Image (cartoon, helix red, strand yellow):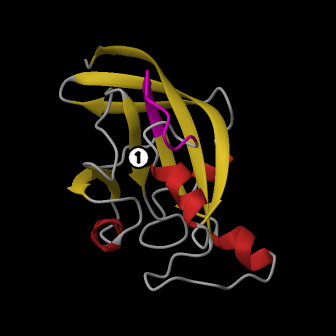
Amino acid sequence: MTSLRVVAYNGTADDRPGTVIQNRRVAASPRGPAGGVGPGEIGNFIVTAHRTTHGRPFGKVPQLGNGDHILVTHNGYVYDYVVVRTMVISFRKPAEKAQQNAVVPGRPGEVPTRAMITLSTCATTEDHAQGNYWKDELDNPEHRIDKIGALVATRPAT
């Protein structure tokens, strides 16, 4: 099990404030109208971190598979999410970025009914293997790998 500090901020996934947080070797969690929710809340708890730089905190996220557990400890509780699918989105396609930031991951406009998590990290290795070296102004590669999980249990932390 790996422990990683997650810093909440007002914004959207992979914006400048979130990138500054990620560059400190921690994970960033956007909140607010254009961001996500907190752990255990109904909606999309989005967590972003670097995979190939700045300590590689999400270095193994692409290896997560359906059925794998993601445990989040917050305010005296452990939230147990199970990975249910993987999305690969393009930063060059606004409709795909909207899927990552949607309150129901992958389904913009849908009303949330349960607590979900999106772990999002770069697909730099995969993009480079295909000859794609495009980057945005924050050095994000074209594609992101998003692991989507659903909350299956909540229990007091011990």
The residue tagged 1 is 46
25 horizontally vs 123: left or right: left
Query: Any magenta on residue 112?
Result: yes
Q: For the point 45% across and 86% down, which residue is it? A: 137
For residue 29, above or below residue 150: below
Disc 1 marks which amino acid?
Ile
Residue 73 in picture, x, y percent from top left? 30, 31
35 horizontally vs 111: left or right: left
Q: For the point 49% across and 43% down, which residue is it? A: 118
Camera-side residue of 38 and 68: 38
Q: Report which quarter residue 149 is drawn in.
A: top right
Residue 15 in picture, x, y percent from top left? 36, 69
Camera-side residue of 148 and 114: 114
Could one spot residue 1 in this view of the protein? Answer: no
Quadrant housing the C terminus: top left
Residue 39 in picture, x, y percent from top left? 31, 33
Magenta stretch? 107-117
Residue 146 in picture, x, y percent from top left? 58, 50
97 horizontally vs 74: left or right: right
Farthest residue, direction left = 75
Q: For the point 68% across and 85% down, which residue is it? A: 133
Could one spot residue 47 in this view of the protein? Answer: yes
Query: Any magenta on residue 8?
Result: no
88 horizontally vs 94: left or right: right
For residue 56, above or below residue 29: below
Determine whether the residue tagged by mark 1 lies in a helix, strand or loop: strand
Q: For the point 44% across and 30% down, which residue is it? A: 111
For residue 44, above or below residue 77: below
The secondary structure making up most of the magenta span is: loop
Q: Residues within 10 Å of mark 1 (few under 14, many from 20)?
A: many
